[in-house]
Image: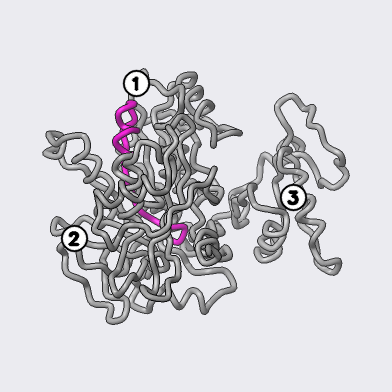
Amino acid sequence: MSGAILNNVNFRLDPRTLSVLLRHSESKLVFVDYQASSLVLEAISLFPSNLQRPKLVLIEDDCGSTPLKSRNEFYNSYENVIDEGDQFFKWIAPESEWEPMTLNYTSGTTYAPKGVLHSHRSAFTMSVMGLIDWSMPKQPVYLWTLPIFHANGWGYCWAMAAVGGTNVCLRRSHEAASIYEAIQQHKVTHMCGAPVVLNMLSTYSKRKPLDSPVHLLTAGAPPPAAVLDRTESLGFVISHGYGLTETGGPAVTCAWKQEWNSLTNSERATLKSRQGVRMVGFTEVDVVDPETGISIERNGMAIGEIVLKGGSVMLGYLKDPEGTSKCMKNDGWFYTGDVGVMHSDGYLEVKDRLKDVIICGGENISSVEVESILYKHPAVNEAAVVARPDNYWGETPCAFISLKNDACKVTEKELRDFCKENLPLYMVPRTVVIEDDLPKTATGKIQKYLLRDKAKSLV
């Protein structure tokens, strides 16, 4: 409304990275929650002396007793800015729907974050798609377990306003106890979250069935069928989609067919773990040979790169024309860098990132398939499989595992034996590493590039 470009910043970043992003985006005004004040002040202190610093506006707590070491670093408080605003100010409409509206930095699971620019058209398209696909009723109660800095909350920050929804915000959205408490207290009807949220909710020690159904949209890394099955048994109604920061959120949805309701729980979960078909705001979704651009066979086995074309694809990467040209082609296709298959019924299934495919003795191994088996083991909390260099095979699968808190002790050998019972031998991890926790981004995606580095260093 003011003509500015909105950049929702990940407050879980370290000061150095945050400082880099603030400089790269040339931020002029930064709204700072009091809990992130020390982080932002340290990030600003890293600015070169000859560079103009953005004005900081402090968002205090409700009681007005925010504990701060220094207030003179702030231009004003949020409440003062509101009180001093011009009530007759007229909305500055964009001259074109293609003008930039938001800037989002990717979550950096594979490399340094990139600035993704989205237009007004993109934000509108994503919001409307989300409402239609979810059959969103008027005045829903929406719980923000998905960070707004993650692709603008998949457009639901605007979509909720369009249907008069109630927004329930959590300061500790990564805690299962807080989520369950908010669901019960506010009678939540809808929420979104990465698969890690589903895993957290379904393994919480004090979990119990919900009093009423809660619709939960998940996207990001392909959720294992076992995790979907456990979560739905609690009363969550799972919808599954696929998208990227570059598409503004989910662009593909696993449209549910009524005849699937007669299947067993595990069969339904397997179908629901597929990403699905294009949403209404997208023109085309395909899986192609990355070298020729020709569509692969729709048999659920032939692997190719996922490409998308539609109304919410980004304008490009900020100050990075080379990076933009690598993934956005002149014919309108956006090359995702994700590997998938297309089933005979036209449903897409994501198999991996191109970087995460393991080539062992000439055989392509999908790390996601191996992970889905590991998640079926009753002791496994998190699983990530990456390539480990091997002099003979080229690469072999290496699994990093974290265990459930209440799980019985399990050994690396027992986990490998479990995989041998459920996978072809060449897909079984040669190495299994059990850790207390796996490294993740702020949106819950496991940072495989860190695990790949760790796998290379294993003796």
Name which residue lies at 31% across and 64% down: 365
Front: mark 3 or 2? 2
| Residue 176, percent from left and from top | 50, 30
| Range of residues picked out in magenta | 227-246
Q: Is mark 1 on a helix, strand or loop?
A: loop
Q: What element carries label 2?
A: loop
Q: Name the residue under label 2.
A: 300
- Up the image or down, 58 lies above or below 338; here it is above
How many marks overall? 3
- Front of the two marks 1 and 2: 2
Chosen colour scheme: one colour
**Three-letter amino acid code of the residue under disc 1:** Ser
Instruction: Specify the label residue 212 is tagged with.
Output: 1
Query: Which residue is at 15% across, 63% downward?
Result: 299
Compare marks 3 and 2 and give the one earlier in the sequence: 3
Residue at coordinates 54% horizontally, 37% vertically from top-left?
174
Residue 423 percent across, percent down from the top left: 25, 54
Q: What residue is drawn where x is 45% and y is 64%?
A: 314
Q: Which of 135 and 369 is in front in this view?
A: 369
Residue 90 is a magenta residue = no
Q: Which amino acid does label 2 sit on?
A: Gly
Viewer can see residue 271: yes
Q: In the rendered structure, are the residues bearing label 1 and label 3 in contact, judged by CB atoms less than 8 Å apart? A: no
Task: Give amino acid for label 3.
Answer: Val
263 up-or-down from 276: above or below: above
Residue 377 point in image, percent of width and height? 34, 40
Answer left or right for 149 relative to 125.
Answer: right
Query: For residue 108, which numbered disc appears in the image?
Result: none
Q: In this view, does 87 lie above or below 362?
A: above
Residue 235 is inside the magenta segment: yes
